[in-house]
Amino acid sequence: MTKSHPKTARPDHEILDVIQRRWSPRAFDSDRDVAREDLLRLFEAARWAPSAGNEQPWRFVASSRRHSPEAFAALLSSLLPKNRAWADVAPVLVLVAVNEAREPGYSPSAAWYDAGQAVAFLTLQATSMGLSVRQMEGFDTARAREVCAVPVTYAPAVVMAIGYAGDPSALSIEKHRDAERQPRSRRPVGEFVFEDAWGRTLR
């Protein structure tokens, strides 16, 4: 992706290039697989995310469309139809699960916060390597738990599609094709960062 790509962020303040280039496509290149060594690099990045008490409460279940088609199809079946409509060509699907059985003094909500940081590290690592990640909340958690054999102490949190961004025109749903071509937008910093007290904009 080049700086002229419509999904490259146009920040108001200087940020890392990898953050500017990160975005979440639905269109994936079905002909390009993700090499095993590259997949391991993504999880190595997640490994080094911070976590309360260094508990590292995240777990990942990865399935490759080419190398484990039955497991891939099973995890794909847990997605809502709107996500199955495009995710079936992604090279890799990954279920993220969170350990809710925390040590005394650590709340389950902190585990979710920590798992989110691990996924963020993974996502930025992917972007630096020319890979893309799309995270999906739209899935049947019970089905995902079943097909991925997730223990009861872990909660399925999100499913990620990982691969190389593809041609938006290949998407079957028009609004998905349109969304792929729209520029990214975010609230300005002044709307969500306050100085000293709520509502006092940091300038």
Image: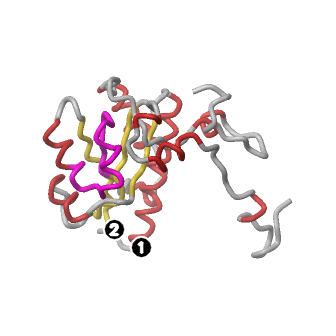
What amino acid is at disc 2?
Arg
How packed mark 1 is, by other alpha carbons closer than 10 Å (few <14, some 14-19, many 20 or more), is few
- In front of the other: 145 or 65: 65
Q: Quadrant of residue 149?
A: bottom left
Residue reaching furthest to the right: 203
- In front of the other: 196 or 91: 91
- In front of the other: 90 or 34: 90
Residue 48 % position (x, y): 45, 42
Residue 105 % position (x, y): 41, 73
55 relative to 200 in the view: left or right:
left
Q: CA distance from mark 1 to mark 2?
A: 8 Å
Residue 153 % position (x, y): 23, 66
Q: Nearer the viewer, mark 1 or mark 2?
A: 2
The dot on residue 180 is none
22 relative to 66 in the view: left or right:
right
Image quadrant in which the N terminus is located = top right
* Residue, disc 2: 102
Q: How many marks?
A: 2
Task: Residue 84: say if magenta.
Answer: yes
Q: Looking at the image, do the residues carrying marks 1 and 2 touch, with CB atoms under 8 Å apart?
A: yes
* Residue, disc 1: 105
Q: Quadrant of residue 108?
A: bottom left
Residue 171 % position (x, y): 40, 40
151 relative to 172 in the view: left or right:
left
Give the answer, above or below, for where 22 lies relative to 96: above
Which residues lie in the magenta part? Answer: 75-95
What amino acid is at disc 1?
Gly
Element at label 2: loop
Residue occupying image coordinates x 33% and y 53%: 96
Residue reaching furthest to the bottom: 198
